[in-house]
Image (spheres, rainbow, N blue to C red):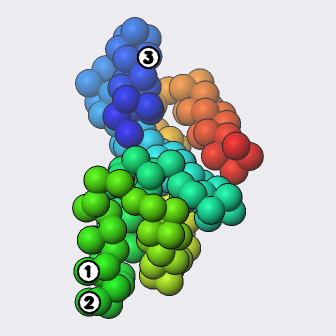
Amino acid sequence: TRYTVECPLVLAGITAGLSEEELRQLVEIARPAGLAFQIQNDVKEFVRGVAVGSSDDLVEGKKTLLLRVAYDRLPGSDRDRLQALLQQEERTPGEIHEAQSLVLQSCAVAEQQFLMETLFEQAALAARSPVLPTDIRAGLHELLLTLRRLIHTS
């Protein structure tokens, strides 16, 4: 999340000459917004993968927050099976489907979608801070709206 949202936003703030306090407020906005963006990206990749019967993240063995939440939510034997599937160097299409089924069974997708919305609300609240000048607050509001729109339409 740092390289997609936090660092660019803070660098823009530094370039604009913001104070330390204002830069800290930008971080308070950027961290939840960046995490929300990453969560939604992982969820979209997973859902798209279920629709086509594969998943780039599962094929590549990426350890995403979605998979971690699914692992934590599954009962013992299902958790062990998901872990075994994810630890393999390569997975067959059948094993990818099995991992997808376990993730769906865990309800981690819905949990992550809820978390994403909560994080965006947190970022929007932080963007209304009087620490920031009015014009910057307005720009951040537009940035957050655009980021949410990108997430929901891509």
Q: Which residue is mark 3?
A: 12
Q: Tally the marks.
A: 3
10 Å neighbourhood of mark 1: few (<14), some, or many (≥20)?
Answer: few
> Which residue is painted at 74% across and 46% down in the image?
153
CA separation, marks 3 and 2?
Answer: 47 Å
CA separation, marks 3 and 1?
Answer: 45 Å
Quarter of the image with the N terminus in it: top left
Whole-percent x and y of residue 4?
44, 31
Residue 80, numbered circle: 1
Q: Nearer the viewer, residue 45 or 80?
A: 80
Q: Is residue 76 above or below residue 134?
A: below
Q: Is residue 85 above or below residue 23?
A: below
Whole-percent x and y of residue 98?
47, 75
Instruction: State if disc 2 and disc 1 touch (CB < 8 Å).
Output: yes
Q: Which residue is mark 2?
A: 76
> Which residue is painted at 33% across and 68% down in the image?
85
Corner quadrant of residue 154: top right
Q: Is residue 81 above or below residue 96?
A: below
10 Å neighbourhood of mark 3: few (<14), some, or many (≥20)?
Answer: some
Instruction: State if disc 1 and disc 3 touch (CB < 8 Å).
Output: no
Whole-percent x and y of residue 40?
54, 53
Q: Nearer the viewer, mark 3 or mark 1?
A: 1
> Which residue is painted at 44% across and 16% down in the image?
12
Q: Is residue 139 left or right of residue 73?
A: right
